[in-house]
Each structure stands twice: as C-alpha cells, then as structure tokens.
Amino acid sequence: MFGTLFVKECKQVMRSLIYIIYLLIMIVFLVGQMGETQVIKEPKPDQDYYGVKESTDEKIIMGNALASLVQEITYESFATYPTGFYKAVILNQEELDQLKSIVEDCTGKSWNQIREEEIAFFEQFGDGVEESIQAGNSYIVLPSDNLEYSDFKLKMQQVCDIIGRGSNYEEENYEKGAKELMTYEDAMNEFHGICETDGITGAYMRMFCDYAGILLAIMPIFLGVTRCARDRRSNVEGVIFSKKASSSVIILSRYLANITMMFLPIVIIALIMQTSYCYQASTLGVTPHYLAFVSYSVMWLLPEIMFVTAVAFLLSEVFNWIVAVVVQMFYGVAALMGSSGLQDITGLNLIPRWNTVGKTEAFFANVNQLYFNRLFYTLLAIGAIILTIIWYGYKRRGGGLYGKKH
C-alpha cells in the first residue's frame, strides 16, 4: 500500500507545474551563481593582493569601522538593517557634521585631511571589478595612537544614536566584520586547507549549499501546500477520508514523495557541477573528495527541505494553504535576513551561510554547531509531520479546527 501510494505521489509531483517551475528556478539560479565562483590558484610570492581574513586586532577593528564611516559620510548615505531589511538613512548637514567631528576625534586629523587621503588612496586603483574589491578591502582609517578601545566604543555608540538601529557601527557588527589583508603565508595556509582538507570539491560544495539553502527556505513551501490544496480543489477529501489506508501511510507517502522529488534534482545538479571541480583538482595534482556533492547535500540541505515541507503540510492541514505560504514566506525571509554574515554556520538559523570558497579552518572549527543546527531542524521536521498525521487522522474521524464536521 505505501509503495504504491509513494510512486503515485512522485508521479503527481513530477507532473505538477509548480514542480517544473521549481526545477527551472533551481537550475538557473545555481548555475548562474556557481558559474561566477573563482578558480583555485596557488598563491605566488610576488602577488600584490592575497585577499582578506577576519581580524580580532582592536586597531584593525577600529580602522575598518572608521573607514566605513568615512565612506558613508562621503556618499551621505548609511546602510542600516533595523528590521532585517535594508534601509538607506539620509542625514541632514548638522548630523553629518557631528559624524565628521567624531571621526576627527578618533583619528586626530581634520576632515579635509582624511578626505584628501581617501581620494589619494583610491586613485591608486583601476576601475575594474577586481581592483574595486581590492581597494575596498584595503582601505583603512587608523585611529590615533592615544584612542583607547573603550573610548572608541563610546564614539561608535554616538554614531548609532545619530544614524539609528541596525547600522555597521553597532558593536557586534563592526567586531564581526573586521578584516585585514592576508599575507603570502596566510594565503598558502588557505590554499593547503582547500586542497588537502577539502580536496577542492568540498570547498565548492559548501558554497553550493549556501546558494541552494536560500531557495530551499522558500520553494518547498509551494510544493508542500499544492498537494493539500489539490484535494480541496477536487473535493475528494470525503473519498480520501473513507479509504482503508491509514493516516500515517497517506501523509508519509505524500511527504516522502515531495522530499524525494525536491532533493534528487539538488544532488544531480551538485554532481554535474562537481565534475568540473574534480577536473580542476586534477590540474593541481589534488585528489578530490568524490562524495562531497552527496555528503554536503544530505547533511546541509536535506534537513532544510524536510523542515520546510513538514511545516507546510502541518499548516495547510490545520489551517489552509494561504496561511502556510504567508507564515513560511515571512519566516524564510526573516531567516535569510537574520544571518549575521555570509560565513555564519553558528546558532539555529534555518539558512546557514558559507558564501566563500575557502576559509576551511574556520569552517571545521565550527562544524559541530552546524551539525547540531541540522539535527535540530530534522527533529522539528519529524515532530511537525507526526502532528500532521495526528491532525489528519482527527479530521478523517470527523473533526476539524472549529469542531466536528457535519
């Protein structure tokens, strides 16, 4: 009975217009994003630029924050995320002057001198994308030698009072976002981590999961609610309720069919993409991790599909598909905006981020937190689908959200 229903459900999902749209969006998005990833190259001792790394040095933290503040004052626009969504703050001249005064206090230089140094610095670089990235990552406005870190934090609080909530000058943001230039030794350590620990393919598959995870916080909602809505549109609930199949068999066959049909294309796309990364590994004399495409997909993406689909089933059965879509869309967007950075696998965010090829040591230093995160959502998914089965059985016996059906 279960096998027959499962195959039937898979066929229904495959014929669904929503599923075809899901496939097209997933393929176009992932191919477009992964096609832009950089090729791994061994660093050379005479390179001008090796990239950046995270820094905990207080001078660097202050210098990064002040550089950002100088640039935002220059453009007279300040990026903030007061509710998780981007909001540009425009200040009046009096407020801009107050910020300039804070910068002067922190650096011991006049605003005109700071601007002249900023212009001279950026004139050294070309107008290309790589040059712009290098310039932005390299620019720093160092504080005066006598500025204590505690005093700097008080100054940044004044900046926050002027700009408002969610700016780059809140302590958590400027401390997490501090970067410093990598040396040749740093770059070689990074290169060896990608080659020896990740086998090249692991590094790329983490970025693949980062991009796929964004879509999978939203897309499974529509496939999940479509199955429940189909019965109601066809007015076949009465027939289904009278069938001999148990509630658990009906719900599980639908649930597992949805998960299978959503997850298989992800694995296939990852496998196809990984072939080019295996070739890249061979050109560097590196043995690739051939199973990275499936191991990362199962560990990283499958729990997300399970959770989003299970909640879609539960909300659709208890309420309706509209409630399920609205609630989960809001939650999915909030999860994306709630991430504290593009390399954040800590905490319990639905969408772990690792939007970089590399930083292998930092990833594996926190990987246990990612495992806990994925286990957490797997257990929530199991709990949600059990509740769906219980509620579905209750409805089959004549129950409902507002009492017995007549």
Image (cartoon, grey):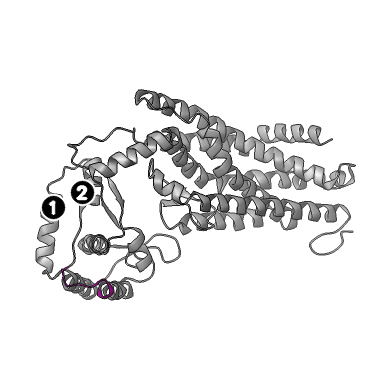
Tag on residue 121? 1
Question: Image point 18% across, 66% down: which residue?
Answer: 143
Q: Secondary structure at mark 1?
A: helix
On the image, numbered disc 2 is attached to which residue? 135
Question: Image point 20% across, 48% down: which residue?
Answer: 135
Q: Is residue 148 magenta?
A: yes
Is residue 87 shown left or right of residue 218?
Answer: left
Is residue 247 shown left or right of residue 310?
Answer: right
Categorize mark 1 by other alpha carbons within 10 Å: few (<14), some (14-19), many (20+). Answer: some
Quarter containing the C terminus = bottom right
- Determine the main secondary structure of the stretch shown in magenta: loop
Residue type at mark 2 is Ala
Categorize mark 2 by other alpha carbons within 10 Å: few (<14), some (14-19), many (20+). Answer: some
Is residue 258 shown left or right of residue 395?
Answer: left
Q: Looking at the image, do the residues carrying marks 1 and 2 touch, with CB atoms under 8 Å apart? A: yes
Residue 30 coordinates in the image, percent (x, y): 47, 37
Quarter containing the N terminus = top right
Residue 126 coordinates in the image, percent (x, y): 16, 42
Tag on residue 220? none
Q: Nearer the viewer, residue 66 or 163?
A: 66
Q: Is residue 368 magenta?
A: no
The span from disc 1 to disc 2 (Cα, nearest Å) is 8 Å
